[in-house]
Image (cartoon, rainbow, N blue to C red):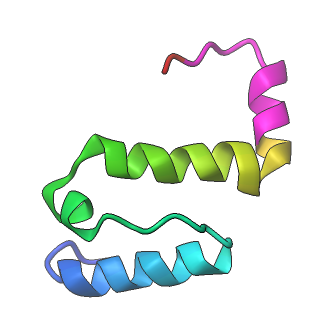
């Protein structure tokens, strides 16, 4: 994915999030500015709700995650 076409990249991200049934509204301005809060909300959903097996694997590993 090229970094130059940010609007198209945001559209692709929205499409992928829709496929995962991400129900929150994507903060487009936050994405364009690189706001960590915008991406943290996506990561939180993917790691805890969408893919519970990944969540279980992370929880059972010896790695520590900090929020």
Relative to 1, is 55 on the left or the right? Answer: right
Q: Tag count in the figure? A: 0
Does 56 lie within the magenta span?
yes
Residue at left 51%, top 16%?
Answer: 66
Q: Report the front residue among 55 and 41.
A: 41
Quadrant (top left/top right/bottom left/bottom right) for the N terminus: bottom left
Image coordinates of residue 63 in percent, x first then y, are 66, 15
Image coordinates of residue 33 in percent, x first then y, are 14, 57
- As displayed, is residue 18 above or below residue 42? below
Does 13 lie within the magenta span?
no
Asked where in the image residue 29 lies, by quadrant, the reply is: bottom left
Q: Which residues are magenta?
A: 55-65
Asked where in the image residue 57 lies, by quadrant, the reply is: top right
Image coordinates of residue 55 in percent, x first then y, are 77, 37
Image coordinates of residue 56 in percent, x first then y, are 84, 33
- As displayed, is residue 15 above or below residue 38? below
Relative to 26, is 18 on the left or the right? Answer: right
Relative to 55, is 15 on the left or the right? Answer: left
Q: Report the front residue among 45 and 65.
A: 45
Relative to 36, is 57 on the left or the right? Answer: right
Residue at left 20%, top 77%?
Answer: 6
């Amino acid at each position: 994915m090229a970094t130059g076409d940010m609007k198209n990249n945001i559209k692709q991200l929205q499409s992928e999030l829709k496929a995962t049934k991400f129900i929150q509204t994507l903060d487009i301005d936050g994405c364009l500015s690189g706001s960590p809060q915008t991406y943290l909300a996506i990561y939180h959903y993917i790691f805890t709700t969408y893919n519970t097996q990944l969540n279980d694997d992370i929880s059972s590993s010896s790695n520590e995650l900090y929020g």
